[in-house]
Image (cartoon, helix red, strand yellow):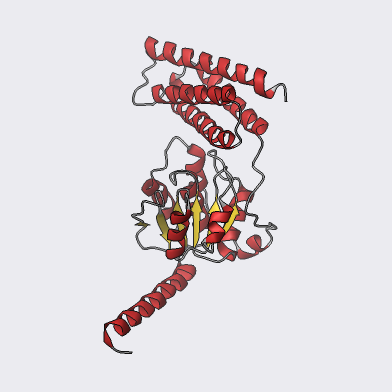
Amino acid sequence: MSGVGGVARWWGWALSWAWLAIGVVVAQEGFKGPLRKLDSKLLPNAIWVDPSVMSGGLPAGKPAFDELARLGIKTVISVDGIKPDVDGAEAAGLRYVHLPHGYDGIHEERLLQIAKGVRDLPGPVYIHCHHGKHRSPTAAAAVCVALGKIDPSRGLEILRAAGTNPGFRGLWQAVERAVPVPEDRLDAVRIDFVSVSEVPPIVDAMVAMDSILDRLQGHQQAGWKDSVAEAASDALMLKEHYVELLRSESERNQEAGFLDLLEQGRKLAEALETRLQTDRFQALTEDTVYSNNVLKQMTNTCSQCHTQYRDNR
């Protein structure tokens, strides 16, 4: 080995072995180093949670998948509800696994499945949702705690670094409650890691939205003030359900009228969530009247949607 090229290759090998050694230490002791945010125009909000797990947003198109491959990523796990671009990933030599979860948190079974995927599938692993701000950092943090890759106290730091909205209380609770999982418990998890999961149909999504709407009506009956934080969180959840449905149903070329109703619902939920922010809502007459009117419009929009597109299916 001689010359500048030889020195460069030597340093490249040395750094690779050093990074591998760090990975071994992480697996044994838990990652205690600083989080590393990746400055990438192709991977939204990308964060190395530990040397084997990165959280971020949707890799859209060939350049994004090529960027993941360049970074050494071997497996991509989507926790988003939208169908993954499996062909795009495979063209870059990456495996795609689809394990979606919602904004209400991560159910225990799903958490164990994601953890087993991170443990057993080729790594490093890129866990993503749409924007990389809410669901994917939650999954990455909770899973890394479950696998002993990071200390439990570091989980919430990941959410803060990603900008996870505190209104998604179920996501924060999923990380707060995460604990290391014994190896034999993960061994017992039975799952086929598929590239595209069967996402709950629209009727099921609407049932979940109905439940949230019922809770909002309960907040209204209680006068909003005493439960304004919970009401704001529910309005935020409802808005994200609309956003998710708009993304998925637009891909299926649903009729314009249905998409228009979804967009109306999204705007109303967003308006209600904004008004119910705890630092603004004072339970004054104008606040209460505004919130009541928005909720009434939202209920009417849901009823119209049910009549035209759900109840007749």
Q: Quadrant of residue 122?
A: bottom right
Residue 16 position in % (x across, y down) = 40, 75
Residue positioned most to the right:
313
Which quarter of the rendering shows the N terminus? Answer: bottom left
Note whether 147 is above or below 24 in the view shown. Answer: above
Residue positioned most to the bottom:
1
Note whether 100 is above or below 203 in the view shown. Answer: below
Q: Is residue 246 visible?
A: yes
Note whether 296 is above or below 193 in the view shown. Answer: above
Which quarter of the rendering shows the C terminus? Answer: top right
Q: Quadrant of residue 154?
A: bottom left
Residue 140 position in % (x across, y down) = 49, 53
Residue 276 position in % (x across, y down) = 41, 23
Residue sitting at x 45%, y 68%: 26
Camera-side residue of 158 and 4: 4
Q: Relative to 249, is 282 on the left or the right?
A: left
Camera-side residue of 75 and 109: 75
Residue sitting at x 39%, y 50%: 157
Residue sitting at x 66%, y 19%: 308
Camera-side residue of 64 and 169: 64
Camera-side residue of 212 and 259: 259
Residue 46 position in % (x across, y down) = 40, 53
Q: Is residue 181 visible?
A: no
How many numbered marks, from 0 up? 0
Q: Relative to 158, is 265 on the left or the right?
A: right
